[in-house]
Image (cartoon, helix red, strand yellow):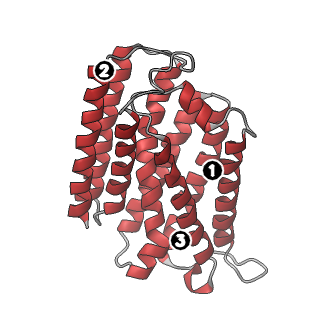
Amino acid sequence: MGKDANGGCLLNVLNLAAYLVNLGITYGSLTGAFGPTNSNLSAKYHTLLTPSGFAFSIWGPIFIWEGVFAVAQMFPSYRANPIVTTITPWWIGACVFQCAWTLFFAQEVMIGAMACMLGIFICLMVGILRLDFLEKISTCDYWLLRAPFSLHCGWIVAATSLNIGVVADFYKAGPDVMLALAMVCFAGIAAVVTVFTFASPKADPIIALVACWALLGMVAELADAEKLKDEATRWNFFAWPDYVINAVRICAFILSLLCIVAATTAT
């Protein structure tokens, strides 16, 4: 890898730049700079899988922890660390897709947003799996350079499921399709958690814990389902019977418990 004029590694500078651009665009979207805010669109395209607002606060820890990575990898002792060199192309790809997702979603180009969400998920998942094939990672290196991406990936697993529902809602899918997609997405979350617990080279408890967090957000949101029942705001309104809402809520809760079991096993 080439060196820049200050003796730093070019790829390390790109990592830091990707982080800053991603941070700026993501939080810029909260101001409505690119269109309706995520909160407004979340209310408009509210689905059975949309979690309570508190669940989205996980973006704070994600950006803080990835910020630690972005700064730490600039220090000479970490510039050529195998973790950094292995994750760099996948991390930059995830940042690019995330910036594009923010812009597509704000403009309600839902197919484009879905494609970008899948891009984020693939980049993070492949990057993590490649890291897990490294022979040895010290405890310090794990928490400083490796763990942030598990936190991010765990949330993207849930966000991808939500995005699938939003696309269907955007195209005004019927309640049968929306309910079927919710069940398929639950199965998808369970499958990813299982892979990273039992089939990954190194078991990953963080992904399971974040999936649990997202599922508990769904459980909380469905407790009263106020936004789901808001006919005035909803784009594709359907008056879901209480027994259906309760059934989905119970499924989310049971799956959250299984995620805790998976995280404990992985640990």
To which residue does mark 3 refer? 85
For the view shown, which residue lies furthest in the right direction?
A: 5
Q: Can you give x and y, in whole percent of width and height, for residue 182 in the image?
A: 34, 29
In which quadrant is the N terminus drawn?
A: bottom right
What residue sits 30% from the left and 37% below the top? 186
Q: Which mark is residue 267?
A: none
Out of 130 and 137, give the one closest to the viewer: 137
Label whose residue precedes the other's in the sequence (2 or 3)? 3
The CA span between labels 3 and 1 is: 18 Å
Front label number (2 vs 1): 2
Q: Can you give x and y, in whole percent of width and height, for residue 117 in the image?
A: 52, 41
Please state which amino acid type lies under the numbered disc 1: Val
Where is 171 relative to 95, above or below? above
The CA span between labels 2 and 3 is: 51 Å
To which residue does mark 2 refer? 242
**Badge 3, how many Cα within 10 Å: few under 14, some, many 20+?**
some
